[in-house]
Amino acid sequence: ISFPKGCVVVVDRGYVDYAWMNVLDSNQSFFLTRSKSNMKYTVVKTFQSEALQDSGVLQDQIIELDGDAKKHYQGKKMRLVRFWDSINKAEYEFLTNNFTWKASTVAALYKERWEIETFFKHLKQRLKVTSFVGTSENAVYTQIWTALIGILLFKYIQKKAKYDWNLSNLVNFIRLNIFVKIDLWKWANDPFFSGKPPDKIGQFKLL
């Protein structure tokens, strides 16, 4: 895959490949990822600022990789940002070849990648989109858009219903009762009420 000059490629650390990252850097594209736990490096420079820790940034450094990684990245420098996530109570290390962003911007950009990951997690877990029915671009788009429409409909029911639904439970209940003849809104408002079934609905004769 080729990326245009100046674009930002944000990937999980499972995709860390220093030779590939070198190609991105040589093409004047920016990468942003998490560092691997076994990464060996030498600190070239450490930036000091009292404002860093106020934004959750613990450290902002310029580094050089050691060993084979240095050879694959052709001895060029990288930026290492160490960040404390106060919400998840966890520390993260980010790698990038952009030396002009604020350290807090580095963390914020990677957080946006998490939002995309959360979106696909919803597709997989709640709508059971675990694989694609086709491999063409049109097939993939169709399946994703269909899933998105489904999520919007479920969220609309969840928001309008008087009952305090958990979204996963709502999806599962509707999936299990998709062919049951009930008044959707009465059921959504009070799912455990066992009243009389709705009146018969007129049906056209089949030709």
Image (cartoon, rainbow, N blue to C red):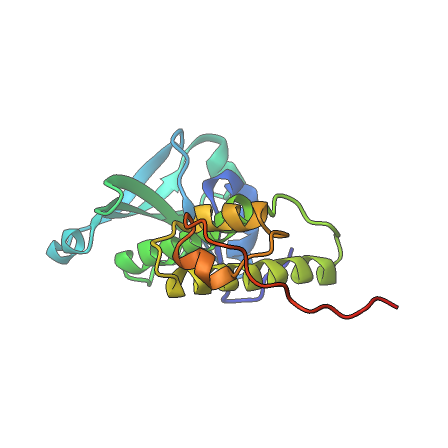
Q: Position of residue 187 (x, y in %)?
A: 46, 56
State how many labels appear. Answer: 0
Q: Quadrant of the N terminus?
A: bottom right
Q: Residue at x 84, y 66 (%)?
A: 206
Residue sitting nearer the eye, 115 or 9 = 115
Q: Residue at x 19, y 56 (%)?
A: 55
Q: Residue at x 58, y 63 (%)?
A: 199
Residue 91 shows up from this direction: yes
Residue sitting nearer the eye, 133 or 203 = 203
Residue 8 shows up from this direction: no
Residue sitting nearer the eye, 50 or 135 = 135
The residue lying furthest to the right in this view is 207
Q: Residue at x 32, y 54 (%)?
A: 107
Q: Position of residue 190 (x, y in %)?
A: 39, 54
Location of residue 108 by image quarter: bottom left
Q: Quadrant of the C terminus?
A: bottom right
Above or below, 15 relative to 139: above
